[in-house]
Image (cartoon, grey):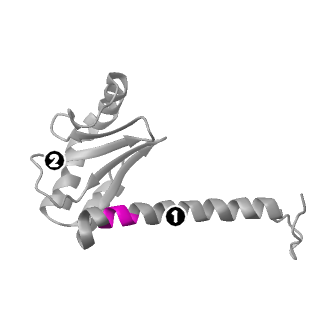
Amino acid sequence: MKLLENKGGGRRLSEKEDFLSSLCYKIHRAETRAQEEEMHEQFGDDFPIQLMVLRMDKVKVEIRKESVNHHEPHMHVAHSDLYDVSLSLGDFRVLAGKIRPKSLKFLRGVLVPLKEKLNAIWVELNEKDNSIGAERLINNLLG
């Protein structure tokens, strides 16, 4: 493994490490572009704002600006390939998707204490159409 020389005297990436790093970056960019294209195909130029509310290990909790009128406020919760569900912000029941009862119990334990704040984020984003205000609320969610 040949190390590339660094004028500052420190270790630089080897050619192999540099290649792998570059490859990972290109794969990430390609996946991001594919997701953006898919969103564009689904929603045209009006694809929804997605705000990450919370991240716990591999679990992502999002509240999205919905382009269609849903019946009730909800959030989207995903854990890699294990589950991707929509949960009601009223009573945290599953509206769409599948999740193991044990995982749902854990999520409820984390999210129920944040119910008022999560609903405020939904209102700010979907009823007041104020994504900046929603982001401020997210920044203060755990504080």
From where the camera sits, is residue 13 visible? no
**Residue 34 shown left or right of residue 140 in the figure:** right
In this picture, is 138 found above or below 75?
below
**Residue 82 shown left or right of residue 27 in the figure:** left
Q: Give whichever of discs 2 and 1 has the lower sequence position.
A: 1
From where the camera sits, is residue 18 visible? yes
**Which residue is the site of mark 2?**
73
Of 81 and 52, the residue lying toward us: 81
Label 1 near label 2: C-beta < 8 Å?
A: no
- Res 41 → quadrant: bottom left
Of 47 and 142, the residue lying toward us: 47
Q: Which residues are magenta?
A: 36-40
For label 1, the crowd category at 10 Å Cα-Cα, with few meaning under 14, some 14 to 19 and many 20 or more, is: few
Mark 2 or mark 1: which is in front?
A: 1
Of 117 and 91, the residue lying toward us: 91
- Tell me what residue is drawn at x 29 percent, y 45 percent: 76
Residue 109 placement (x, y as % from top left) = 32, 29
Residue 117 placement (x, y as % from top left) = 24, 47
Magenta span: predominant SS is helix
Farthest-out residue, bottom: 7
Q: Amino acid at mark 1?
A: Ala
Residue 92 placement (x, y as % from top left) = 21, 34
**Number of numbered discs present?**
2
Residue 141 placement (x, y as % from top left) = 32, 50
Q: Does the magenta portion include 116?
A: no
- Tell me what residue is drawn at x 34 percent, y 34 percent: 110
Q: Does the magenta portion include 37?
A: yes
Secondary structure under tag 2 reads loop
Q: Amino acid at mark 2?
A: Pro
Secondary structure under tag 1 reads helix
- Res 22 → quadrant: bottom right
Question: Where's the N terminus, which quadrant?
Answer: bottom right
